[in-house]
Image (cartoon, helix red, strand yellow):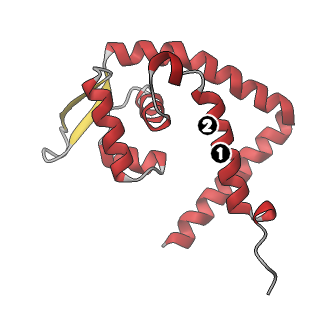
């Protein structure tokens, strides 16, 4: 059996790349708005305009329940998210952006998109499309293996 070499181990490399890119983009919102990476992820997903339960946010972000719960509570406390009972399931609550949350997303999104554009330019448009397709395949396979 060949030894595990982290420098060539795909899960490790994906994690490192993800952490580096997240940290880069975090500079756009951490200092100015005092947001953590999990908080920004919730704001960005909820900016799509569809209220979501915490369970839906766990699924969409691949973050654990505790992380999502803490991030959501901090955003509610700051007045950036609002919570209301779900119309589909009265036991659940749905989260959505407040006007203040929308305002922050509108300020941060262009900066985040500029970082993305720079990253894509570094590998080229066609390579970025292939990378997107490969990432989707990896995500699908990881879900299959988790079952």
Write the residue at 70% across / 28% down.
116
Distance between the Cα atoms at labels 2 and 1?
6 Å
Residue 25's x, y, as percent?
A: 62, 28
Q: Against 137, is 32 above or below? A: above
Q: Residue at x 29, y 22 (%)?
A: 78
Q: Tell me if 116 is positioned left or right of 58 in this view.
A: right
Q: Which residue does the image show at 62% across and 65% down from the upper left?
A: 141
Q: Residue 88's mark?
A: none
74 relative to 61, above or below: above
Mark 1 lies on residue? 18
Asked if the residue at tag 1 contacts the one at tag 2, i.e. Cβ–Cβ closer than 8 Å, the answer is yes
Q: Position of residue 101 (x, y in %)?
A: 37, 19
SS assignment at label 2: helix
| Total numbered circles | 2
Q: How packed is label 1: few (under 14 Cα within 10 Å), some, or many (20 or more)? A: few
| Residue that extends furthest to the bottom in the rendered view of this protein | 1
Residue 40, given in percent of the width and then of the height, sits at: 47, 30
Quadrant that contains the N terminus = bottom right
| Residue closer to the observer: 79 or 117 | 79
Element under disc 1: helix
The answer to whether residue 53 is above or below residue 134 is: above
Nearest the eye: 58 or 129:
58
Q: Which residue is mark 2?
A: 22
Residue at the outermost left position: 90
In this view, the residue in front, 147 or 112, is 112
Residue 54 in the image: state x and y as whole percent.
31, 44
Density class for disc 2 (Cα within 10 Å; few <14, some 14-19, many ≥20) is few
In the picture provided, is 60 more to the left or to the right than 122?
left
């Amino acid at each position: 059996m060949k030894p595990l070499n982290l420098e060539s181990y795909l899960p490790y490399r994906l994690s490192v790349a993800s952490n580096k890119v997240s940290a880069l983009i975090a500079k756009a919102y951490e200092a100015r708005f005092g947001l953590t990476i999990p908080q920004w992820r919730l704001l960005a997903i909820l900016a799509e305009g569809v209220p979501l339960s915490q369970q839906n946010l766990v699924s969409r972000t691949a973050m654990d329940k505790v992380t999502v719960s803490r991030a959501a509570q901090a955003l509610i406390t700051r007045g950036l998210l609002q919570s209301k009972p779900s119309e589909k399931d009265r036991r659940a609550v749905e989260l959505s952006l407040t006007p203040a949350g929308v305002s922050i997303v509108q300020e941060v999104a262009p900066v985040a998109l500029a970082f993305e554009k720079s990253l894509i330019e570094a590998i080229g448009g066609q390579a970025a499309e292939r990378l997107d397709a490969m990432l989707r395949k990896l995500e699908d396979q990881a879900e299959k293996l988790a079952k």
